[in-house]
Image (cartoon, rainbow, N blue to C red):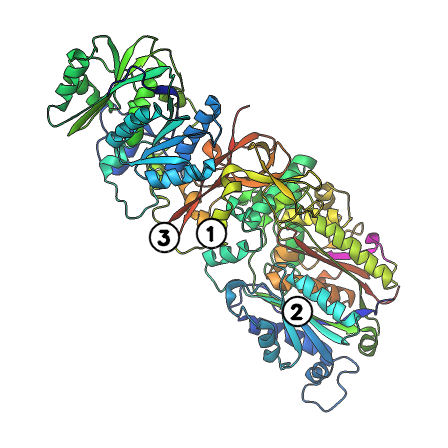
Amino acid sequence: MTDANSAGVIAGGFRAGGLRVEAKALARVLGIQPPRGLQEKRVTDADETEATLAWDALSDLLAQSGVAPKGLAKLFVASQDAAGTAAVLVDVLGDDSLDVVTAPGDAQSSASALATALHQAQTSEGPVAFVAVQATTRYDPSVTVEAAAMMEDGAGAVALLVGADAAVQSTGHKNSHGKRALAQVRKELNGGAEDAAGLSQVAAAVLPEKRRGLERSLGNLPLAPYSADRLGALGAAGPPAALLQMLAQSKPGQQVALLVPDAERVQALTFQVQEVPRVRSPEAALQDPSVQVTGETALHVARTWQENAHAEPRGAYVPYPIFAGQNPARLRLSGQKCLGCSRLLFPPRERCPGCAGADFESHRFKGEGSVYSVTKIGTGGAPGEFAPLQSARGAYGVAVVELAEGPRVAAMLTGPALDGSGVKIGDPVRLVMRLLYVQEGRPRYSFKALPFAP
Amino acid sequence: MTARRVALVGAGMSRFGVGGKSAAGLFAESFEELRSGLAGMPGVSDGDDADPAVAFLRAHLGEAFVGSLSFGGAQLGNPAALFLEHVGLAGVSARRVENACASGGFALRDAVNAVASGKTELALAAGVEVMNDVPDRHKRYWLGVSGDTEWERTAGLTFPGVYALMAARHMHEYGTTKEQLAAVAVKNHANGALNPKAQFQKEVDEKRVVSAPAVCDPLGLFDCCSTTDGAAMVLVASEKLAGDLMQEPVWVAGSGASTDALAIHDRERLTEIPATARAKEAALQDAERGGFSLGIEDVDLAEVHDCFTIAELMAVEGLGFCGLGEGGAFTKSGATRRDSGNGPAVNPSGGLKAKGHPLGATGVAQAVEVYRQLTGQADKRQVRDARVALTHNVGGSGATCAVHLFQRGDA
């Protein structure tokens, strides 16, 4: 399925989990040997999930590409919980009519979905986004994860904008099964009917210990650098992450391939680089602020919500339908402008507290502001529904945020400052989507305040 | 129309603390103190009734208002009837009044209004709360339901958290220090040490307060009040009835109340509780209508809502005992100590901080202390020559506030 005029990758971005754990420290807690070459990895913080990582990556991509939240023609989501994650993304985008394709599963289904996205983008009437994500925070008690996976799995999300007139054109998708699949693909890439003689680079999302073996199998073709030693295995997000890192270092005119091998199957996606695309590679994203945690903390955070997801509500209870009704405000910062006195209101309300008018137009807040006041809720002080979060990180911070447009709102802190440390009145913050808590088996999302350096 | 004057003619409270008594049991304990005080009054012990005080109440009591959050949920519905039945007063019109921690102050206001309106000659304002009969996580549930549940609470906030946000902002804007906050705890614990009904009757020093474990930065353990079981009640009488009972009535000179946005982020400022200033102004105006010529500078003692140390600083500022932002220095200077002589004695009972804070009972217990002080029955913690007093009761983080002014004898 090669097409000279095929679509390709226009832009791409990557987000890593907010916590960093050393492989040795985690291996000690799990009582197993770490994979060779894995130095450390990124895992999800206690308020990060597939959906929050995916949205972080996707929202960055949309902002950088100048695509409006409702401007996508199609969205592909590849992850373990692709349907759940896609549902949250649709809520955040506020686009109920968006055409969504979900690819539940691992790297292979992610690669297939990417190939499909590239194919369908040729005929699509608007921009197509492909999002692949893996999280390590778990809230489903029925999911048991063996120690080896706990050891290897990292957290990250990739978002790609695909379409026609791309900087990087898709030139093919090969798919081989069976024991000789790798040899078959290698042969096709190197000397088959198609012209692959000029193949410059091959990317694959493999952990360092398997890297050399793969290179040997490929006839000593060196793999493009990929930061698996600091990311861990990223499941569905692995292949597009490796692709992004390769594309970031590519040169115009190069032919490159993404290889996705496992025991039974090998897929290869080939591309022609017309120009170096606008991508934020994993290598660059690893420079984002993160928090180093101990092996114990990493494991505790991963299981934080699992043990509490189905506990009876212990807090000031907001019924789910009421909560979900607030999604436009919580996820999209949709507030009001009073038509009587022009006052901007957030969160939304029935009547204007200023002029008591009831005529509003909706107003979407940008989500930037500053800390008006801040505190830190420590041991024993958390309401029941937040007790798992508090125990995961020792404390959590809460701020009153003054939005740039005027209104103030209470918001939990997130990111490296989740535990409330180092945040002062006046610090700039941005509202981002994070997990509030898991109740009745359902994750609830809202805005939280992420401090940033202006 | 000139309002009818009303007066306090009796008061009682249970021991505050962790008692193991039921709400009805605590109500009965506080009633016993009120009953024995009433029994000795002229105009009460006049027949051959087995219990003249109860007979008097059965004859005159027209309304009862019981402040309670019904914390823990032991008797959520219809508790007022149960309480009155337990003290032999079944039959009296009664209801529960709920405004979170200001339930008691609003029960008092309702009793005052009932008598002032002329509908009854005698009304009971009571409050009761049992907080220590449930496990900690259950307590946190109840402590969390009086704030804004949809936006404030889902940001992970608690009451200590909300007051900590106020404290942080107060420190930021005015340079208020932890030592100034600690001065509230040191003073109120010193007063509580002289109050045999107080939950905590031990003094603490500044070092211990400042170095206590953090609850919500910048507030530490000693910046926060405790959870308390307790009950309190006062009798509110018409001028005519009060004149029969007491030579020098304790007038309820003024009553004022106000509300505000429930969530703190919806308030214009975090460094003050606007409902406090509004309720105070309303109380002063009410006093003026009643023919009392009172200003805030006349107040000899004030029982203010010090659920957290920062709350007392905001209270003394909001009530006008000092300027905005000056509460820290004013308190640290000792001006509000019981014996300072250059400011009102603030929380001579020990306040919520040392006396304890059984939510619904607190606003009424403040009036009990005022009654004791203005009738010269406050023993070791007596404020000398006390003539004018004020109570200030706040619900939640300032969504409700009731302020009352009292005066002994005529001006």
Mark 2 belongs to chain: B
Name which residue lies at 57% across and 76% down. B82
Where residue A310 is drawn, which disc sits there?
3
Say which residue label 2 marks. B126
- Label 1, label 2: how many angstroms apart (C-alpha)? 39 Å
- B273 above or below B256? above
Residue furthest bottom as drawn: B48
Q: Which portion, as a residue range, is magenta?
A: B294-302
Say which residue label 1 marks. A321
- B133 above or below B306? below
**Magenta residue check for B55:** no
Q: Nearer the viewer, mark 3 or mark 2?
A: 3
Q: Secondary structure at mark 1?
A: helix
Q: What is the three-letter code of the residue carrying label 3?
A: His
**Would you say B314 lies left or right of A449 here?**
right
Q: Verify CB contact (< 8 Å) between mark 3 and mark 2.
A: no
Q: Quadrant of the N terminus of chain A?
A: top left
**Would you say A336 lies left or right of A237 here?**
right
Q: Quadrant of residue A400?
A: top right
> What is the crowding at mark 1: few (fewer than 14 residues within 10 Å), some, or many (at least 20)?
few
**Which is more toward the observer, B388 or A145?**
A145
Q: What is the three-letter code of the residue carrying label 2?
A: Ala
Name which residue lies at 75% across and 64% down. B373
Q: Quadrant of residue B250?
A: bottom right
Residue B86 drawn at (x, y percent): 59, 79
Q: Nearer the viewer, mark 1 or mark 2?
A: 1
- Label 1, label 3: how many angstroms apart (C-alpha)? 18 Å
